[in-house]
Amino acid sequence: MKVMVTGATEGIGPLFVKKLSKFSQIKHIIALKSSDIDYHQIDDEQEEKLTMATAKNLRPRALEDVFRKNQDIDVVVHLAYEDKPGKNENGKAIHETNVFGTMRLLNLCEKYGVKKFIHKSPSSIYGANPDNPVLIKEDYPLRGNRAYQTLRDKIEADILCQTYMKEGHKPKVVIMRFCGIIGENIRSPLNTIFKFPFVPVIFGFDPMFQIMHEEDVTDALIQAVIIEEAEGIFNVAGKYNQPLSEVILRLKKIPLPTSNLALSVFYKPIFMLNREHTFPFDLSYWKYPFVVDTTKTREILKFIPQVL
C-alpha cells in the first residue's frame, strides 16, 4: 500500500509517519513537508519506505507534480492544517491551505485514481450549544462558531469532503472527527490551557467533556488506513466522558473557578499577545457539552483508545 501524508512535518504528522511505517502493509510513504525534519526514530528498513516531497500551502502546481510522479498512490491522509498567524493578516494564506488545499487534494485524488482519502477534522465543528444531545452522532448538524476563521475553515473543509462521498465513487472518503487532542506535538488553544497548572472553570458550568492523547489519534488514523471497509464519517474520542472539572483533575491540574467576564477579559490576551493562535479557545466549549458518540468507530474501525 502506498500512502501520501500531508502535514507530515507538523503537529502529529511525524509521529503518525513513524508509526505507520512499522506496518508491513505499508510499502511506501510520501511525506509532504512544510519544514525540514529528521525522522530520527525510523530504522533503516522503515526509512527505505519514506520519500519526502514539498508542496507548500498545497499550491496547485507543486501538489499535482507530486501526484504526477506517484500515480499509484492508494491512500491520502490529509493532516495539513494552518492556524498560526503570519504576515498575511487577512487570513488568505490560512484559508488557502485549509479549504482550497483540501479541494485540490480531493480533485487530484479523483483524477489520479486514489482509492481512499482520509481527512482529520475536529469535533468542535458540532459546536458547544446548550441544546446539544447527550451524545452527538455523525449526522448531527455542524453548528460550530463560524466567527473564528480556523473553525470556519474546518467546517467548510469537512462539508467539502462530504460532497465527494458517493457510493462506488473513488476515492472513498473518510472523515475523522476527533475530540480535543492533547500531547507534546499539539499546538492548539485547548492544549495550551491544559499546560497551565491552574485551569480556569466558569462558575455554574461543568459540562461533559472529552479529550484524547495524540498517540491514540495516530492509532485511530492508522486503523482508517489499513481497514479496507473504512468509509464515511467517524467520531473519535478518548476513554472517558467526564465533567470538565474531573478531566482537569485527571490531568493532575487544579481547577480555578472564575466568572465568564473575568475569563474573557484576562484569558484572551494570553493567546493573542503571544501570537500562539489565531483565536483563543471559544468559551462556549467551557460551558456547554459537545460530547460525541463513538459507537461507529468502535464497531467499524475496531479502535479502542489506550492512553486517555
Image: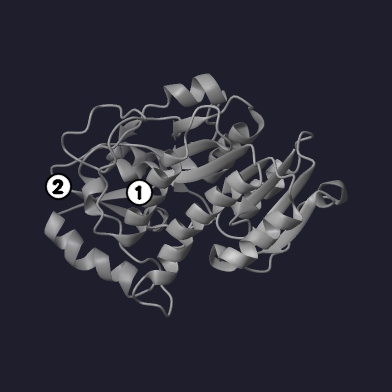
Q: Nearer the viewer, residue 92 or 167?
A: 167
Which numbered disc flags the more N-terminal residue, 1 or 2? 1
Left or right of 266, for residue 305: right
Q: Residues within 10 Å of mark 1 (few under 14, many from 20)?
A: many
x, y percent for residue 69:
75, 57
Residue for point 14% across, 55% down: 260
Q: Nearer the viewer, residue 132 or 192?
A: 132
For the residue labelled by badge 2, is the local secondary structure a helix, a strand or a loop?
Answer: loop
Report which residue position mark 1 lands on: 155
Q: Is residue 36 above or below residue 184?
A: below
x, y percent for residue 87:
42, 80
Left or right of 135, for residue 216: right
Q: Nearer the viewer, residue 268 or 85?
A: 85
Looking at the rendering, which quadrant does residue 2 occupy?
top right
C-alpha gap between disc 1 and disc 2: 30 Å
Q: Nearer the viewer, residue 283 or 234?
A: 234
Report which residue position mark 2 lands on: 203
- Residue 58 visible in this rendered orientation of the protein: yes
What amino acid type is highlighted by mark number 2? Phe
Left or right of 261, for residue 112: right
Looking at the rendering, which quadrant does residue 65 occupy?
bottom right
Residue for point 87% across, 47% down: 45
What amino acid type is highlighted by mark number 1? Ile
